[in-house]
Structure formats: structure tokens, C-alpha cells
Image (cartoon, rainbow, N blue to C red):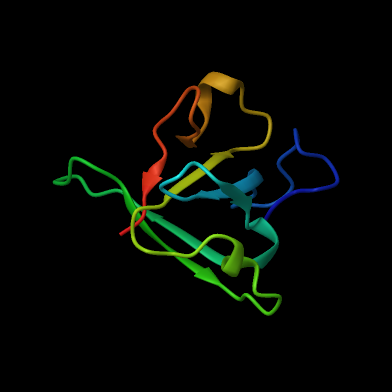
Amino acid sequence: MANTDSPDKIEFAGDYNLSNIILQNHEGEAVDIKAIVIELNIYEGITKNAMSGTLVVVDTQNVISKLPIIGQERLIFKLATPGAHESTHIVDASEKTGHPFSCI
């Protein structure tokens, strides 16, 4: 669960900080879809050379019409443990310091 009251303090097991989730299309246009994301799962396998995941979105306001999904999008976000320093993010899928996920 995201800890919104105190982002630097762990209150419960499984607490996390996730500031935004940006969906960027092949032309570079981007939309923050965090408000419509219901579930974000990230998987890392010991025999795999890349991380993978799934994203569940409930789009009742047709936000995705601004950014049609055609399979060439990138997902940009930072997921961290509360109180962790910038260098210790669990998953850094940002453009500046990490590697955005490719949507297929």
C-alpha cells in the first residue's frame, strides 16, 4: 500500500512509494495514468535477463483516447521503499536514471 501520510516512514509490511506512472507513446507524448491504475505487478526471475510485469487499468473517463495504445509504448515510474535513498529504489524505470519498461 502506498504510504501517503508519511512517505519516509514504513508503517506496514509491503509499504511503497510510487509518485506517478507515465505512459509514453511512440511519438513522445505522455500521460500520467496513476489515477486509473488498479494493479501493477512486477516480476523478476533468477533465470531471466529482464524484468516483466502486468498493469491493470480501469479507464472510465477515456483517458487512453489521448494516447492510443498500439504496442510501442513505454511505462515510466519509480517504485521505492519508504525512507530509501534515491540510489536504493526497488525499481527505477525513469528516463533520467533508469530504464523505462517497453509495453508489448
- Image coordinates of residue 34 in percent, x first then y, are 65, 56
Q: Quadrant of residue 71?
A: bottom left
When the figure is inspected, residue 96 is found, relative to residue 8, above or below; the finding is above
Q: Give the residue furthest to the front.
A: 27
Q: Which residue is at the front of the view, 37 or 102?
A: 102
Q: Is residue 44 left or right of residue 63?
A: left
Q: Residue at x 42, y 39 (%)?
A: 100
Q: Quadrant of residue 33?
A: bottom right
Q: Residue at x 60, y 38 (%)?
A: 81
- Image coordinates of residue 22 in percent, x first then y, are 57, 48
When the figure is inspected, residue 63 is found, relative to residue 24, above or below; the finding is below
- Image coordinates of residue 18 in percent, x first then y, are 64, 45
Asked whether the viewer can see residue 76, the reply is yes
Q: Give the residue furthest to the right.
A: 5
Q: Is residue 10 left or right of residue 69?
A: right
Q: Residue at x 49, y 65 (%)?
A: 68
Placement of the N terminus among the 4 image quadrants: bottom right
Q: Which residue is at the front of the view, 31 or 12?
A: 31
Asked whether the viewer can see residue 37, the reply is no
Q: Give the residue furthest to the left.
A: 47
When the figure is inspected, residue 53 is found, relative to residue 96, above or below; the finding is below
Q: Residue at x 60, y 62 (%)?
A: 66
Count of all numbered marks drawn on residues in the image:
0
When the figure is inspected, residue 64 is found, relative to residue 13, above or below; the finding is below
- Image coordinates of residue 95 in percent, x first then y, are 48, 30
Q: Which residue is at the front of the view, 13 or 29?
A: 29
Q: Which residue is at the front of the view, 83 or 97?
A: 97
Placement of the C terminus among the 4 image quadrants: bottom left
